[in-house]
Amino acid sequence: MSRRLRWVAATAGLVTRALAAQDSLSLPAFLAQVVAHHPTAQQATLVRRQVAADLRAARGGFDPVLTAVWDLKRFDGVGYYDEFDARLTVPTPWGLDFKLGWENAAGEIINPERKTPGAGLLSAGVSLPIGARLLTDERRTALRQAELADDAAEAERLGAVGRLVQQAARDWGLWAEASARARIATEGVALARFRLEATRQRVLAGDAAALDSVEALGEYERRRVQEIEAQAAAVSARLTAAVHLWRPDGAPDSLAAARQPGGSVPSGLATGPAARRRLAAAHPLVAQARARVLQAEAQRRLTATQVLPSASLEVASLAAGTELDALRAGAGSDYKASLGVRAPLYGRREWARFRAAQDRARQLAWERDRVVREVELALERAEVELDAVERQAALQRRVVEATAAVLLGEQRRFEAGESSLLLVNLRERALLDERLREAQLVARRAQAVGALVAALGTPDVLRVATRDVAQP
């Protein structure tokens, strides 16, 4: 019987070889599947693509444009006019537009200024803004803001996935804790049942008082109640964790009842103040705030150009026919030019827009600084929490080992008749309680990892070094 009692005490250790052989799902593997297939991650990717399409549309503002107009009028046997005008405009990112055109006008009644040679009139020239609008205009501002919106959308995608990872890691941790509690409760019931049977045999043999069997039966029933509760909680936690799992075809996935959380949990990252500032600068929330500031700055520069007087100059060389060589031959003698000037006299609307854009840029700059500070502190808190949990887990393993040793000693005293069944049960309860605390620390570690992932702003949890977790 002494050997059997020692075996019972040994089964109350941290982990058994049988558990290692079970089909387990580690936290990195769980999160990898969540990031790859969860609808939230897919939706974030689609939003990113939509913004990328808007960026392509903004870039389309600099695509060459070909226009052609044919205008014909004939009435009562009279051919009034027959006009054709084709233009090719090639915009550039510097505000300069190159233009090439050909026009031909014929007819009995035609405006003299529209008259062209019989072979048509060829023109080639440029359109150039003069003044502040040489620096920026609506088209270039729209492109710049679309580029920044694309950066912000990527940051939003990473942020959404990071928040998803944080919640999934939390639910995995609760599943791990609940599974460990159910497993510990089942082991406790097995120990209590074995002790109940052994005590009954000792009572029948006259080696123990009948009251000992009542004590053993009460302990067994107490642990049965705890087992039922723990198993129900484990099923509930498993179903909650399964909500995050989806298959590649878009169908929801499930977690088999036999599958258990286990494997390894990412360890902490020791960064320090300098590395923390570098990581915070690359955080999605900071990237979004920075993009909004730059968008506001682009709008401020545009409104500044509207306050000042502006002008645009268009010059084109002319030649008859369709040959480009004729343009060079007639350069300097045949041409057309136009100059447009705009100068707001009061500028109340322009000044109001400029000041509003300026205040908006300042407001977003303050917002960016606040976000940077909050991200740095969140990262520091996540590091401190994960480091504390890891140190607690290491100490808790030693506590469990010490409590198991005390239980083994108490069992030996009980075999020698120097202790009571009540003390053995109390020692065993203490061991089970310490193992439950260890299970809680496993859950806290998973939650701390999720918080660290969110604080880092990256869902790439697989690149983080992992540590094996001893399942309690």
Image (cartoon, rainbow, N blue to C red):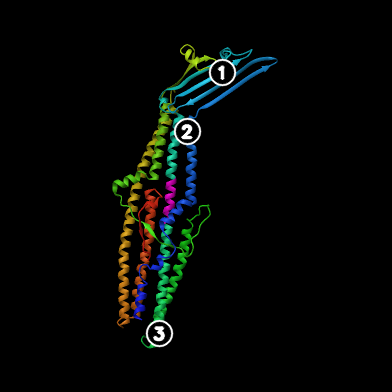
In front: 17, or 228? Answer: 17
Disc 1 residue type (three-letter): Glu
Badge 3 or badge 2: first in the primary sequence? 2
> What distance separates the C-alpha of mark 3 from that of mark 2?
88 Å
Does residue 305 appear in this view?
Answer: yes
In front: 472, or 129? Answer: 472
Residue on which disc 1 sits: 103
- Mark 3 touching mark 2, by CB under 8 A? no
Q: Give the percent coordinates (x, y) of residue 385.
A: 33, 56
Residue at x 32% of width, y 68% of height: 400
Q: Give the percent coordinates (x, y) of residue 332.
A: 46, 12
The answer to which image quadrant residue 343 occupies is: top left
Badge 3 or badge 1: first in the primary sequence? 1
Residue on which disc 3 sits: 201
What secondary structure characterizes most of the magenta part? Answer: helix
Dot 3, how many residues are within 10 Å of its Cα: few (below 14), some (14-19), or many (20+)?
some
Residue at x 55% of width, y 25% of height: 67
Where, quadrant-wise, is the C terminus in this rendering?
A: bottom left
Disc 2 residue type (three-letter): Arg
| 159 part of magenta stretch | yes
In front: 45, or 297? Answer: 45
**Is 400 rendered above or below residue 448?**
below
Q: Give the percent coordinates (x, y) of residue 43.
A: 49, 47
Residue on which disc 2 sits: 59
